[in-house]
Image: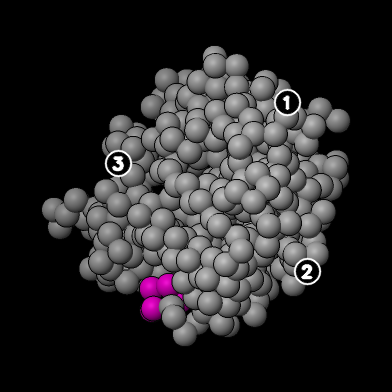
Amino acid sequence: MISRRSTLALLASAGLVPALAACGPNASPGSGGGGGGPLRIYWWGGDLRNGMTREALDLFTAAHDDIEVAPEYSEWTGYWDKLATQFAGGDAPDVLQMDEAYIDSYGSRSSLLDLETVSDVLDLSAMDEAVLETGRLADGTLVGAPLGIGIFSVGVNPTILEKAGVEMPEDTTWTWDDFAEVSAAVSEWAKTAGEDVVGFDFFGTGAAELGAWARQSGEQLFPREDETLVSVETITAYLEHALTLVQTGATAAPSEQLEDAAAGVEQGRFGTNRAAFHLQFHTQVQTFQKSSGSPLTLLRLPALTSGDHQMVNKASMYWSISAKAADPTRAGTLVDFLLRDKEAAKVLKIERGVTAFPELQTEIESVLDENEMVSLEFARTMQEEVVRPPLVTPASGVGFGDELSRLGEESLFGKRPPAEVAEEIHSALTGMQPST
């Protein structure tokens, strides 16, 4: 998979990142969806998402025979390069799928439409307000309509736990130390039984992991004015915990962890019944269920202090509209249909995340299978305890995930002590904070 670091380097070398600044409302119009021409919509995803989206678009054109839709689709690895090229060339799609990591990069350059300017056709008033807020820029401009929510959580393979003679953890009270003990117990059983299984697949190089660890410490990676930047001490504790997991056998050796992460969702340990636990955004469990063939379930994140999980709703992704769309009303009409139409919801189900419109959650129950209901029921349960979500990644911080991975690996492999690596991570993160 192409990393964010690689993507940004490619765009910068081609002069495309600066060019986005010229792609705002005053830029010269391109060919995207002009006047009575086709309304272009662009998204990323796998074959399942592609098929579902095209079926929903067929429903839209059947209901709006005066609007022609031109679908454009890409896998994740090529999506952002193509999108940057389109914006730089003045040929952006009218409607586009947007990710949390990039929405500020595009939105703060005035490349995305203020969705509240088309509120007469795009009604987001019934969406959970806390989720809707994640689509706003720092100045309050709404540039992304969340498609659904994803909750960072623990995927569990109950079959492995049963074979290992390990009880399902009580996730309302467990801590990271409890998680480590349970994972180590599974790994020890596997070693004795000659099974190629570990308790927990990998940990110590992911921004979502550190973000959760920071929240549970009362800190944030990208804090608001009333919040605190994650400290060196907190980052050090996170890196030290990752080393402890390796030392106790709770996770595999560092080299095996990197191989597993690179193998991808379907071929990694958790997706092939070779790990009992995996950290993930909760709707991903459907893909793991399919690849493993096992009845997987979900648990809350372990906590630093028992009971204080600091779980949050993350917008799984967004629909955005190009600021250059020649007919924003038609684009808004399409986004409204994809988000709120009951029949479209039954087609799209929860593959892009659990819808943030409560009435649609009830509507789609009849078409969800047992595996899909695991995701829906978990999201519903967690709504009673989720806390305020963090800010979306600012444009200045898009490269942090790759920087953390690089530095986290140095600690994980024992090349440098955690405290030293934590200082460098903290310095990099401080330099990525948005200017005020």
Q: Residue at x 19, y 51 (%)?
A: 196
Q: Could you tell me which residue is drawn at 44 percent across and 80 percent down?
A: 367
Quarter that holds the N terminus: top left
On screen, residue 339 above or below 221: below
Q: Position of residue 207 (x, y in %)?
A: 55, 40
Most foreground residue, 237 or 95: 95
Q: Position of residue 348 (x, y in %)?
A: 48, 67
Taking 172 as reference, is 112 left or right?
right
Dot 2: element:
loop
Residue at 81 percent across and 47 percent down: it is 141
**What is the magenta range?**
369-376
Q: Which residue is mark 3?
A: 263
- Density class for disc 2 (Cα within 10 Å; few <14, some 14-19, many ≥20) is few
- Magenta region, main secondary structure: helix
Callout 1 touching callout 3 (CB < 8 Å) = no
Mark with earlier residue (1, 3): 1
User: Which kind of residue does numbered mark 2 sit on?
Assistant: Ser
